[in-house]
Amino acid sequence: MTTSLFDLTGKTAVAVGGNSVLGSAIAEGFAEHGAKVAIVGRNLDKAEEVVSVIRSQGGEAKAFQADVGSRESLVQAAADIEAWSGGWDILLNAPGTNSTTPFFELEMEEWDRIMDVNLKGIVLTCQIFAKRMVEQKRKGSIINISSVSSTTPLSKVFTYSVSKAGLNSVTQFLARELAPEGIRVNAIIPGFFPAVQNQKILSPERVESIMRHTPMNRFGTPDELKGAAILLASDQASSFITGSMIRVDGGFGSMTI
């Protein structure tokens, strides 16, 4: 049956940043298709809220606290998740932070803070969680959440755009590095969704500009990321997909003038 292509029963998914707006929607999608889900976030209370939603829908999930800027906390979270589930087959990297500071006013402290979360934190996470997948000989999938600004730099989000461009490079490098181990690495490039880091810069003028550049003429909803994520999580449905950037952007990346 076609539906079996997307069956994640028996899989464990680790959703880093799974307590965010977009990360939680994807995590819920994994659970809806049978995966056991570890919600990892810096804010444990928010992670617990996502777990409650998943459990209320009949899924299995547990919250874990970790800061992607701290190797020690990620190592501890990995150990705790392994004790809970025995290991994992899917790694979602969905943490993110942003700023609207103009380029000439940018302090390196802010640059470092954004890079630490959006790029360095994901590299650290992959070092820890992908290494354990290799050691356990668990084939699987790593899914990184990128951004439309990674390929078409957006105004007012300099550091964010650079960090996401770096993440695309990390995705392709790790796709090559981990393919012999049976681990696929891909990225989803979301368009404009009502994520917290977007709301700060969505003035009426900017919304109008975004809509002019989006053929579908609307924002995305978090649930609309589920399909791409479940596709990439499934060993059957995406067995020959690695190093790819899948756009879920309402056509934003296809638009010029």
Image (cartoon, rainbow, N blue to C red):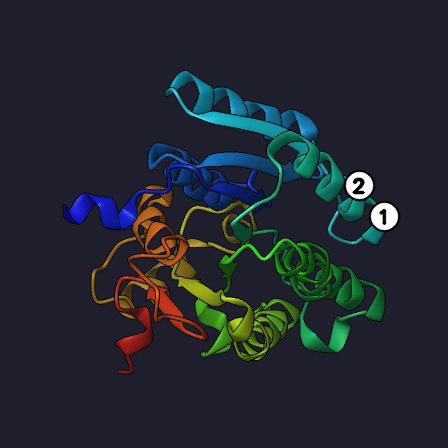
The answer to whether residue 202 is above or below residue 209 is above
- In this view of the protein, can residue 154 be seen by the observer? no
**Disc 2: CA contacts within 10 A as few (<14), some (14-19) or many (>=20):** some
Report the residue at 62% width, 37% height from top: 86
Left or right, 242 with reference to 41: left
Number of residue marks: 2
Residue 58 at what x, y percent from top left? 38, 20
Report the residue at 73% width, 51% height from top: 68
The reply to whether dot 2 and dot 1 touch (C-beta < 8 Å) is yes
The answer to whether residue 204 is above or below residue 1 is below
Which quadrant holds the C terminus? bottom left
The answer to whether residue 62 is above or below residue 230 is above
Tag 2 residue: 76
Left or right, 191 with reference to 111: left
Foreground pick, 115 / 10: 10
Secondary element at tag 2: helix
Q: Amino acid at mark 1?
A: Glu
Tag 1 residue: 72
Foreground pick, 228 / 135: 135
- In this view of the protein, can residue 19 be seen by the observer? yes
Left or right, 134 with reference to 198: right
